[in-house]
Amino acid sequence: MGAKKRHIFKVLALVISVFTSVFWAGLSSASSIDTKKTSMTLSMFQDPGRLDVVTQAATSLILWIPGNVYEPLVSFDSSDKPSPSVAKSWTVSPDGKTYKFEIDESRKFSDGSKVTAADVVYSLEQFKNGPILAYKGPFANVSTIKATKKNEVTIVLTARSRGFFRGMGTMAGLVMPASSEGKRNSNPIGSGPYKVVDYKPGSHIQFEYNKRSSAKKPAITSVKVRFITDSPASLLALRAGEVDGLPITSSSIWSRISSEGYTKDFRKILKPASGELHWLMVNQKLAPYNNPAFGKAIAKMINRDTYVAGLGAPKGAMVPQCGWGIMTARTFKPASKENCEIDYNPAQGMKEIVAAGLGDQVFEFVGLTDVPSLRLSADLITQQLQSAGLKVKRKDIPLAQYSSTIFNSRPPAYGLSLMGGSGTLADFVCLDQQKYGYQTYCSPEYTKLMQRADRATSDADYFKLISEANTLLQKDGVVIPLLARTGLGLYNKKLMGWTPPTIRVEIRLSDFRWEK
Amino acid sequence: MSIFLFRRFLAFLVAFFLTSILIFVLVRVIGGNPATTLLGEYSTPEAVREIEIQLGLDRPIVIQYFEWIINLCSGDLGTSFRSGLEVNYLLASAIPVSISLSIGALIVAVLIGFPLGIISAVKSYRGSGTALDFFSQIGVAMPIFWSGALLSMFFGVRLGLLPTGGWVGWSENYAQSLRHLVLPSIALGIGIGSVITRFVRTAVVEVMRQDYVRTGRAFGMSEYRALFSIGLRNASLPIVTVLGNIVSHLVGGTVITETLFSMPGLSRMILDNVISRDILVVQNLVMIIVVYILIVNFIVDISYFSLDKRLRVK
């Protein structure tokens, strides 16, 4: 009897302890959120100038508007798994050429109007026919976009395309009302969790919770994004408590961030290595740079580890890379003997230059005068090429001049240049030599591999073909990846909730919360 | 007087048209196609061409110039390529910021420059005068970005008394606007104040050596009384010229100050738009600054005319 009683007592004690711990865990997690603090101020080093996502592709815009003001047709998580968003369901025909999206009619835009199939058609047409080449990509195989019912959109493709469906979860799939035409520069309207209530060029964007959104009410309902163009000044503002976070820091202040204890006093967020890259671009259409030996030899002269170390970034903020990440960080691999198609061997590289009859040639290397984060990078590359014995003449020009001249002249200007940005493998697809005459690289083999990857029916096939394209890109030595800049953010230690982007590089404000 | 004014106004008009041509040409020479800049580097050539037509960049350059100058004179400053917003709207929000900063910096500069310049001149052969002279030289040599960063670190971060940057409109919160103005005004005003100190010192030392001051002192006037009642009016001529130049050159200082303190003013707007090659905004803003400088010089000329009786006799 005593043993039975003891047994009952033990079971009772266990039940009580489990209940108590669950209760306390729930209570502590609930009480750890500071519900009284519902606002935050973040800093950004660039003013987008205008807020229209259809005609403006600046990172300073993509960070704030897409993930907060708009919603895409379909959502994708970090492992590329689709889930309903503006479309509550969808069907695909067996041949993969016809998509039917059922629009969630309960969703409303911040101006109070209902989201309709006509709005979805309008939005997709905007991106399809818009001026930004990267947003047109998912529509490459689209023949028609029609509202077939009040709440149904049917999209017909000329060929199966993985890029199309994945694209509906990115910028190209954002949904906006047709009535927003002409007003988006200062007043974007979407169905996302926030709306823009004030945009003062050169000063700030003010977001407030969009009460009409069907998303759960965020813990932080009021967000101010201040434009602090001087990077050291943004660090001072963070230290003074005037801003609560710097979601993106310029690499020109990374050494200060490390040496002045910012990584200790603030929460450091390293974004996944998915988008921001540095790479060398060899112009395949301009002599003598178009000599196939040149690019391959250059690739042998660059030591990526030395390059990354020379930039002095905080640990993990820059990763040497010789392949390309594909939209998300899933396939990203840092440079290694296994994945680098061309090994570091400067002496061999120089021998190949001499053998190709280019030993006495002076090569122009173009850097940028007004992008501080790339100036040191260009210095490091120049040094490495000169140490290998290459005759390099450095030319520094402003970014705007570079952007406008490289793609407008035929053949494109500048033989060897350093690039930095959110490049993806899809950017080097070149369907038509004439139409894409402004591209510095145009390879039919590469384009074919990328097209086959787009039509692949299984993930395994897709990744195999992408990886082949990646290898070809490296072997051609026209686009030479150097590093993946993971991006470094600093936040107040009590400000939690940063989540990796899924649309492009957006910062989802609705995930943030203050902890007690 | 009227002939003098007429001549100055004629010079004003000539300067206006010559600088307008210079600005129009230079803005186009600095390179960069605004259409490509507007659309980004991955834009299609067709889209670039369409924007060029839309913005009138495909028309002959002479026609573009005359259209611009006619629109400018009629107050139509057009629409920004970059923001799609009217330049008048952008100006309306930026000008109050820059004017506030300029006035704030001038007040600081005058409060520093005049008293210190006079004290330094009166005590020029004593230790305190030499010390003031030394500090004014440091003030002139001190870059704004350095003094501004130090002020932000001390008053903003260390003491937490004043904001390190940003701006609140006068209509939103008067007290907050004032708080946001203090550090930038001091940062910009220190350098200008030091320049004024040196000019006031030189002018006053020169005047104090004149016979009429010596005569005044011989009649029993104190050094300061002789200076304030006789000397300063005569010392004011070169100071007015210097003040005119300083007001004109404030624009250069405000570029750094507005960037350093994240103020959405006119100078920072010019800088942002130069970088993004928004040529319409740049040429309009630079023209506005040219007109401002021409008006300041015009006022300086009139002040000179009223202060110096010899000019009126001529």
Image: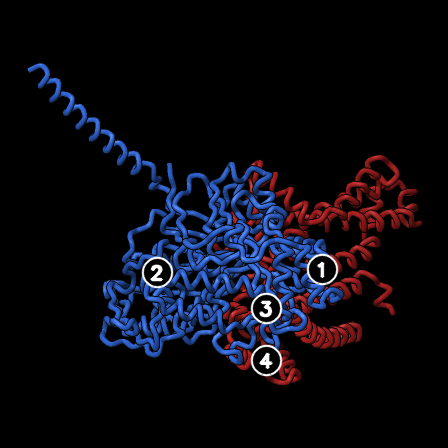
Residue A194: % across, % down: 36, 57
Q: Residue furthest left?
A: A1
Chain ID at mark 4: B
Colour of chain B as rendered: red
Quadrant position of residue A515: top left
Residue A65: % across, % down: 42, 60
Rendered residue at 62%/65% (across/down): B274
| Same chain shared by disc 4 and disc 3 | no
Numbered label attached to residue A459: 2
Chain ID at mark 2: A
Q: Using the numbered discs, state the Cα–Cα distance from disc 1 to disc 2 in whole angstroms.
A: 43 Å
- Residue type, numbered disc 1: Leu
Q: Which label lies toward us, 1 or 3?
A: 1
Residue bearing the label numbered 3: A403
10 Å neighbourhood of mark 4: few (<14), some, or many (≥20)?
some
Q: Nearer the viewer, residue A129 or B110?
A: A129
- Residue type, numbered disc 3: Ser
